[in-house]
Image (cartoon, rainbow, N blue to C red):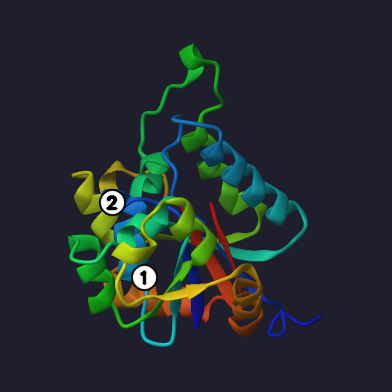
Amino acid sequence: MSAAEKKRSLVVMRQSPYGGSLARASVDLALAMGAFEQNYDLLFMGAGVLQLVTGQDSQKIGAKNIGRILTSLPLYDMESVYVDAAALDRYGLNEADLVLPVSLLDESGLRSFLNDADHLVGC
Amino acid sequence: MLLHTLNAGSSTDSFRDCLRSSQSGDAIVLLGDGVYCALANSAARQALDDCPARLLALASDVFAAGIADRVGDVALIDMDAFVALSEFYPRQLAWY
C-alpha cells in the first residue's frame, strides 16, 4: 500500500497519567501501533495533557514514567502530537511545561481535526 | 460525521470536551451516567440543546435511572437503533 492510501489513525488521550491504568494502556496502544507501522497522531485533551508534563518521577509509586515513554514515541512512527489548547489553559500550563513539541488546536481546529481522521480511538 | 457516546455526568471534563468537539452532522448518544445530562431544565441539557449535534439517549439507561418522564423531548433509542447508528456513522468517539 502506498503512503497516500495509508489510513491515518488518531488516538485521543484524555486520562491523567497515574490516577488509574487507562493512561498507561493508551500509551501501550500507541507503542503497539508504532510497532506495527501504523500511521497515527496523538491528541491530548482534558486531563490527558497531564501525561505530557515535564519532571514526572513515578519511581516511588511503582509505575513507569509516562512522560518518559511519551518522549520515545517519535522513534516509533508516531507522526505528530496535538494538544487541545483549552486543556492546557484549564490546568494553567503552557507548551514550555511539556515533554514534547506539540501543535496546539483551538476549538474549531479540534472539531475539524477529529472529523478528518480515518480511525478514532478514544482512551 | 462522528458518533459521540457520552457516559459521564455534566461536571466532568468528558462532558465539556464532548460538547466542544461536536459539530453539525454529528450525533451524541447519552448512556450510563450520561443520561442525567438529558434532565429537562438542567444547565447540561441546555448546553446539549445548544449544541448542533443530534441528541439521543439510550432508553434502557434512561429507564434504569428513573428519569424517563423528566427528560422532555429527547430521542430515546433501543439497542437495535444504537447498533444501526453505529453502522451509519463512520467514526465513533467514546467519552467517559
| Kind of residue sitting beneath label 1 | Ser
Q: Position of residue B13 (x, y in %)?
A: 32, 51
Can you identify the residue that label 1 sits on? B21
- Tell me residue A67's x, y (percent): 47, 36
Q: Residue at x 57, y 53 (%)?
A: A74
- What's under tag 2, amino acid-wise? Glu
Out of A103 and A58, give the one closest to the viewer: A58
Residue under mark 2: which chain is it in? A
Q: Which quadrant would residue B45 be assigned to in this image?
A: bottom left
What percent of the width, then of the height, locates residue B85? Answer: 59, 79
Name the foreground residue: B20 vs A65: B20
**Furthest-right residue in this view:** A1
Kindly identify the residue that appears in the image at 50 percent across and 77 percent down: B2
Residue A60 in the figure: left or right of residue A93: right
Residue bearing the label numbered 2: A95
Q: Residues within 10 Å of mark 1 (few under 14, many from 20)?
A: many
- The image shows residue B73, relative to residue B59, as above or below, that is below
Q: Is residue A102 visible?
A: no
